Amino acid sequence: MSGTDTHDDAVISRQVRRLESLLEEKGIVGGDTVDEVIDGFLAGASPVNGAKVTARAWTDPAYRERLLADGTAAVGELGFSSGGVQKQRLRVVENTAGTHNIIVCTLCSCYPLRLLGPSPGWYKSEAYRSRVVRDPRGVLADFGVTLPESVDITVWDSSAETRYMVLPRRPAGTDDLSEEELAGLVTRNGLIGTAVL
Amino acid sequence: MTDESARTGRFAPGAHVRTYLHDPPHHTRLPRYARGKRGVVVEPEGPAPLADVRAQGRDDAPVEMIYAVRFTARDLWGEGDHHVVLDLSESYLKEAE
Amino acid sequence: MARINDVGGMTGFGVIDTTDDAEPFHADWEARVFALQRALLVKKIFNLDEFRDAVETMPPQEYLAASYYERWFHAIRTLLERKGVIGEGALDDD
């Protein structure tokens, strides 16, 4: 993404304020709506949600089955919505010893906001979107991840109203950890597929 | 398309399909790197209004089944050992020859 | 014909800046643009596919020079002007 200098920021923030006043005058978007949407979004969307789902799947085999079969319903059991102004479906894809999954949206920047929180800048960048479908091993190397040649990599390019989340592999030596402690090991990049936990 | 076929879809998991060499002047959700390529249906995802028509602000967009379709890197790029899955509307797909 | 957003498989965009960018918005106006987009979708002033179309049809040079939420603002403004919700140039300085 390109940067925005201070001058551009001043111009555009004036224009945005003007647009808000016009929409309020016309009764299209109420005065408090914008703040409510921002607050609601920041409160409801977090990678902590995806981490909780992951830890539950690691500790409850029946939940894992349900999560992989119907992600939308299974995250709903934990009180999470798959989100979206338009109806969205959640599909969880599981990493195993032989398979690794990575998420992208090459056409725009589709992302499971509710479960992963606001997307990182790099996820929205042309650099990531252009390259990961062509050279996922090279992209993983940029993130410091090297997988054995034998691991089959699948890149999920979200091009409709399904949102994808990776179910990472549970790290070795974590048998004694509680579900809550396990959730603490899960990172956002692990849920996108650009990290191995 | 009838409501019934939008619900069940034309392609079953495992079906061999090919994307159309589709280069429309309007919005579409078939990326150019996956046009005219063969793939295998992973699963139907459910019906949705066709984005190509809906993007024109029209209310009469046909409702079509969306499919997760898996492509090999070799078919997409001529090399590579990975796979790419895209979510594609039924009218982007035909039965593979 | 392919549009500038359709970048899968293109080269030349440089290295990925993998720095963890936890800040969702870099300025207050970005958050407000994000929220306006959602509010206008909910009000059905435009739909998500129209919004994507309006981002994609930015001239390529402008698209590449714009930040993420500048693209969003461009799209919102374009659609509202096209639909006659606001006048052409209504947001510009006098």
Image (spheres, coloured by chain):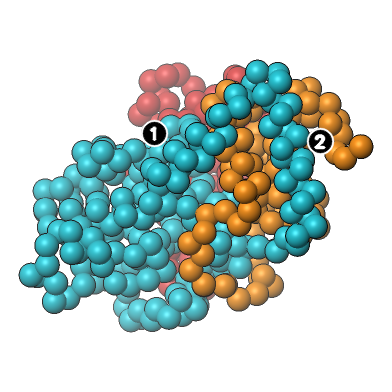
Give neighbour class at mark 2: few <14, some 14-19, many 20+ (Cα, 10 Å).
some
Looking at the picture, which amino acid does disc 2 mark? Leu
Q: Which mark is residue C91?
A: 2
Spot occupied by residue A119 in the image (x, y as percentages of width and height) = 49, 56
Where disc 1 sits, the SS reads strand
Looking at the picture, which amino acid does disc 1 mark? Gly
Chain A representation colour: cyan
Q: Which chain is red?
A: B
Q: Which mark is residue A51?
A: none
Spot occupied by residue C24 in the image (x, y as percentages of width and height) = 52, 54
Reading the image, the residue beneath label 1 is B46
Chain C representation colour: orange
Residue at 18% across, 59% down = A180
Discs 1, 2 touching: Cβ within 8 Å = no
Residue B58 can be seen in this image: no
Give neighbour class at mark 1: few <14, some 14-19, many 20+ (Cα, 10 Å).
some
Residue at 21% across, 38% down = A77
Mark 1 belongs to chain:
B
Judge left or right: residue B23 versus residue A174.
Answer: right
Judge left or right: residue A11 versus residue A31.
Answer: right
Foreground residue, A35 or B93?
A35
Mark 1 on the same chain as mark 2: no
Spot occupied by residue B63 in the image (x, y as percentages of width and height) = 50, 26
Which callout, 1 or 2, points to the residue nearer the camera?
2
Where disc 2 sits, the SS reads loop
Relative to C38, is B88 above or below?
below
Residue at 45% across, 46% down = A42
Residue at 51% across, 36% down = A37
Relative to B52, is A94 above or below?
below
Judge left or right: residue C62 versus residue A169.
Answer: right
Residue A187 can be seen in this image: yes
